[in-house]
Amino acid sequence: MSGIRHVYDVQLPGRGGGSLAVDLHFTGSADEHPVLLWFHGGGWTRGGRRASEEKILWPYARAGLTVVSVGYRLSGEANHPAQLDDAFDALAWLSDPESGYSFDTSRVFVGGGSAGGHIASLVGVNLRRYRRRHGDALPPVRGVIVIYPVANPLEYDAAKLAAGPPAPGTFAAWSLESTGGRPAQFGQALLGPDPVLSPSPFLDSYRELVPTDVPPYLIQHGSNDTDVPFSQSLLLYDTLSSQGVPTTLVLHSDADHGSPWFHRGLALDAVSAFVREHSAPPS
């Protein structure tokens, strides 16, 4: 796309002995814009950092963000918290003087959609814990931007099992077909075989949060989401706001999961306004 620079397959050190790959999308130079560290959807089991990049990532770049799309480990490679470890490794890399890139680390936001929204949400409430591991390498996070996020993976699984057959042409119908006609238990695949030993990250992280350490959240969801129920965003909103975290929840009428409306018009305007409000002055 003319005007947007794309840098693919940037390798950075990752946990577990391997490397972690990211893609960059920005206009002008990478260091002149706020950074959006982005985590893709796909039920933690599939998808990738280039999934629907033209629809999802390029609009953010055109809106004046430097987008860093993270290829975190999927649940088939490692269970939680590997995905969160990868997220924080990518966050720390933004301020690494040996990265070969210069970013404005005074204006870093994290975001994601669906399962990626779950990862981004966990980043926001785990900054204090991971700062003990990474120290000053972690730049401050100015805000969390998520669309139709999963808040509680096990509740998400239960809702998929309880739902009736999806209407043809919906996102849920496509998802069901892609998993062979059986409701996928993505949350269980993320957490591992024993939910007692692998309790929901939602319960762990959100019970222990310290509001002053948590950045503001912008949550957007569609009223016609056939895959992730709106109750997941409402759960995230209620939990954060009840503990004093500044949280905004925007409901878009008639929008289904994966709708292009989340990356244009009012939804994109909401992201731009949120970034302007919570950005620190450029360094």
Image (cartoon, rainbow, N blue to C red):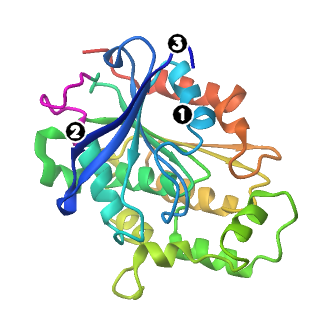
Find the magenta span and give its range: 92-102
Q: Mark 2 and mark 3: span between their CA atoms?
A: 25 Å
Is mark 1 in CB contact (under 8 Å) with mark 3?
no
> In front: mark 2 or mark 3?
3
Q: Residues within 10 Å of mark 2 (few under 14, many from 20)?
A: some
User: Is residue 121 shown above or below 139?
Assistant: below
Residue 107: x and y, percent? 34, 26
Residue 169, percent from left and from top: 85, 57
Residue sitting nearer the eye, 70 or 80: 70
Separation of disc 1 and disc 2 at Cα?
A: 20 Å
In which quarter of the view is residue 233 placed?
bottom right
Q: Secondary structure at mark 1?
A: helix
Which residue has dot 3 on it? 3
Quarter of the image for residue 173 reads bottom right
Q: Secondary structure at mark 3?
A: loop
Disc number placed over residue 93 in the picture, else none: 2
Badge 2 amino acid: Trp
Q: Which residue is mark 1?
A: 57
Q: Nearer the viewer, residue 14 or 114?
A: 14
